[in-house]
Amino acid sequence: MKNIMIALCAMMIVSYSASAQYDPAFRFGIKAGANLSNINGSNDLSLNSTQSAFSFKDNDNRSLGFVGGVFFRFGKTFYIQPELLLSQKGGRFNVYEDGVQNSDGKVDVRFSNFDVPVLFGVRVAKFFRINVGPMASYRLTSNGKLGDSFDVITGSNSGAEFKNRIAYGYQAGVGFDFGRLALDVRYEGNFTELVDVNFNNATTASQFGKKGNLFQATLGFSIL
């Protein structure tokens, strides 16, 4: 038993030493983590000439979602890191009519995306990185409740739907490398408007919930 414990300790020391010396010019690995997302939705929405405007205000609580996929890193001090990720995003809103919260006024928007960020980074110290870059996002699915939520609130056919299947944005953040392990914390913003609202087939106010944003934390492991 004593010999087995000694052997296990020796293997752990060797493994840690090898990991500490791990610093290749190319990395390929897997990563997973969480998104805390929201959609900027503070627009006033006039339904028609006889109905008053609704004001959609952001909820303080962000939507929690999963993110995971693979990453490639080329370079050491200066590097480029493209990633392929499945990412769950969304947002929740309170609805106010004439300054008073509507009793049915809760809109819950959730969707799943295939994200391709391409980050350009610099390693400031051995374990610390800073990176920023563009991102393209392709919407795979939505929860189907967007239009239903608007219909309940307004009592009419809102025609609410996601405006664009492809969205463009950016990511920026910092990272920490511990051998093969990598911890990343980022902010993501969007340039593309996400949602169309078309009440009674009239484009009175077609831009609700303009752009999404999120905070993301992931843990990665380099296979190569």
Image (cartoon, helix red, strand yellow):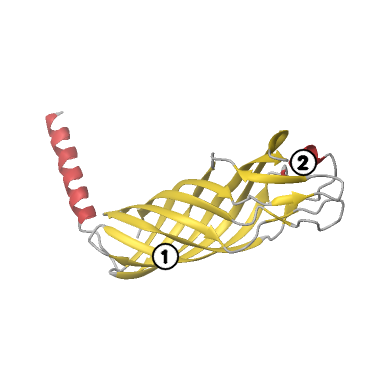
Residue 223 percent location from the top left of the image: 36, 56
Distance of label 1 from label 2 (alpha carbons) = 37 Å
The residue depicted at 29 percent of the width and 55 percent of the height is 177
Q: Nearer the viewer, residue 141 or 209?
A: 209
- Label 1 amino acid? Val
The residue depicted at 80 percent of the width and 56 percent of the height is 204
Residue 182 percent location from the top left of the image: 34, 53
Q: Is residue 70 above or below residue 57?
A: below
Mark drawn on residue 148: 2
Q: Is residue 167 left or right of residue 44?
A: left
Residue 64 percent location from the top left of the image: 53, 41
Q: How many marks?
A: 2
The residue depicted at 87 percent of the width and 46 percent of the height is 50
Neighbours of disc 1 within 10 Å: few (<14), some (14-19), many (20+): many
Q: Is residue 182 left or right of residue 204?
A: left
| Label 1 secondary element | strand
Q: Nearer the viewer, residue 163 or 42?
A: 42
Neighbours of disc 2 within 10 Å: few (<14), some (14-19), many (20+): some
Mark drawn on residue 199: none
- Of pointers 1 and 2, the one earlier in the residue sequence: 1
Mark drawn on residue 132: 1
Query: What quarter of the picture does the C terminus occupy?
Result: bottom left
The residue depicted at 47 percent of the width and 61 percent of the height is 171
Q: Is residue 45 visible?
A: yes
Q: Are marks 1 and 2 in contact (CB under 8 Å)?
A: no
Q: Is residue 148 left or right of residue 101?
A: right
Q: Nearer the viewer, residue 43 or 151?
A: 43
Residue 32 percent location from the top left of the image: 45, 48
| Label 2 secondary element | helix
- Label 2 amino acid? Asp
